[in-house]
Amino acid sequence: MSRRRLDIVIVGAGMVGLTQAALLAVRHPQLRIGVLEASTDAPRIAPQHYDPRVVALTKGSQNLLEEVGVWGETTARRACPYTVMRVWDADGTGSVCFNSRDVQMPNLGHIVENNVLTAALWARVAQLPNVEMVTGFRLENWWRDCGHWFLQPRGDDENVIEGLQESVDTVSTRLLIGADGARSRVRDLLRIRASDTVYRQMALVCIARCERNHQHTAWQRFLKSGPLAFLPLEGLGDDNHCAVVWSADDELARELLMLDDAAFALNLEKAFESRLGAVESVGERLSFPLRARHAERYFGPGAALIGDAAHSIHPLAGQGANLGLQDVRVLSEEIARALKRGLEPSDASVLSRYQRRCRGENAATLKAMSTFKSLFGAGDLHWRWLRNTGLNMVDASPLLKKRIILRAMAV
Ligand SMILES: Cc1cc2nc3c(=O)[nH]c(=O)nc-3n(C[C@H](O)[C@H](O)[C@H](O)COP(=O)(O)OP(=O)(O)OC[C@H]3O[C@@H](n4cnc5c(N)ncnc54)[C@H](O)[C@@H]3O)c2cc1C
């Protein structure tokens, strides 16, 4: 057993934590960075199947992933650019179509499978000489002494430093970054409260093969029970596969989960108005309970929260990971600024600047998602009129559309 002392420790090797580790390591080769991850194995990519969990990444996120050196690897494997986004209301005639041509860009973003991205990040972090990845380390306890955090895993885990085959029982650091997801242990240990909105909805995700080509379009139909998205995929031979994200009230979601594949495919096709012809086959269905959480603070003494640990959001606008990667960009800028001025990156002034720059923006996005969700869930005539008129007004205004696209792409 050994103790490890590191400059910065990140808890959680999801896409946000790994990007944070890689970015800091690339920008500051003098820093020794640790990543503590509860699971023991790197994500696996099935060569013949798409992962049903995907994210729609913006140009802003792409830029960050390019800087850490994983974008080429990710796109070479499987990342599908989409040039058009079509959104329409199931209950009326409102619709809006965004096109990358409106902003003279080659695309609006990319759909990337979660495991393709995390596997590329995991491999990249393993190449960086100043990052130590400790797997099987589920953070459970800690104490703080003389400005250092001392971190310990749950007793029964086997914590092994990647490449060294050496167990670790305590890790210490001055700056701890919690990237350990929506049910963050770091957030709990820091006693930071989080607002919690339970939507009583589940997101059902699966891969669907459609009769017609997806046309590199992200499709989203707003049903009263929740939004249904078909997101284009490529890399396994044809352009007919889509990642489906169907947010539905709990009861409906449970019914949909119980159906056999053929009956589910029929329901899916009907809910999607057969926009891509018949849904010919569907893969394994996974479900995620939907809730929005927002931490009251993004930092404590010598510790910061990023990604889903700080905020988790309804997937209807596909922004969760993008917001998390934006936290990474801002926190890295503040750490660089501190180092330049001879300050400790764990200094409260550094972490509070990070919070100031991110929390307000994230709160506005969370609020906007909740408003959208309520607006599209309302069956009342007035609300129906309002949202249909709103969608058509946006569609008829090239200037407004351009502004919306540019703002969404920057996240
Ligand atoms: C259905 C659905 C669709 C979505 N679509 C989109 C989209 O289109 N675009 C988008 O931007 N976002 C989307 N999101 C959101 C996005 O998936 C998340 O925001 C993102 O994956 C969060 O990444 P993260 O790294 O912060 O957290 P996570 O991916 O949750 O990673 C946390 C990591 O921490 C580890 N961990 C947890 N606890 C501990 C501990 N105590 N000790 C050590 N390690 C620990 C876990 O094992 C895990 O590896 C979607 C989400 C859902 C549910």
Image (cartoon, rainbow, N blue to C red):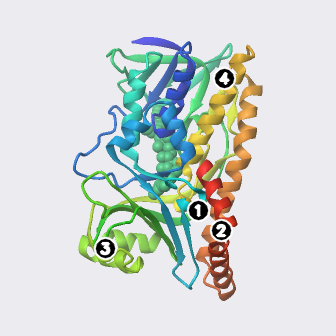
Inter-mark Cα distance, 4 to 2: 39 Å
Residue 160: x and y in percent read 36, 21
Residues marked 1 and 4 touching at CB (< 8 Å) = no
Pick whichever of labels 3 and 2 is earlier in the sequence: 3
Quarter of the image with the N terminus in it: top left
Residues marked 3 and 2 touching at CB (< 8 Å) = no
* Secondary structure of residue under mark 2: helix
Q: Amino acid at mark 4?
A: Ala
Residue 190 in sight here: no
Image position of 105 (left or right of 43):
right
Residue at 44% across / 64% down in the picture? Answer: 217
Residues marked 1 and 2 touching at CB (< 8 Å) = yes
Inter-mark Cα distance, 1 to 4: 36 Å
**Residue marked by disc 2:** 398
Q: Amino acid at mark 1?
A: Asp
Inter-mark Cα distance, 3 to 2: 38 Å
* Secondary structure of residue under mark 4: helix
Residues marked 1 and 3 touching at CB (< 8 Å) = no
Residue 337: x and y in percent read 71, 23
**Residue 336 marker:** 4
Pick whichever of labels 1 and 2 is earlier in the sequence: 1
The residue at label 2 has a CB less than 8 Å from ligand 1: no
* Secondary structure of residue under mark 1: helix
Residue 410: x and y in percent read 62, 48
**Residue marked by disc 3:** 264
Q: Nearer the viewer, mark 1 or mark 4?
A: 1
| Whether residue 13 is situated above or below residue 382 in the rendered picture | above
**Residue marked by disc 1:** 102
Pick whichever of labels 4 and 3 is earlier in the sequence: 3
Pick whichever of labels 1 and 4 is earlier in the sequence: 1
| Whether residue 164 is situated above or below residue 182 in the rendered picture | above
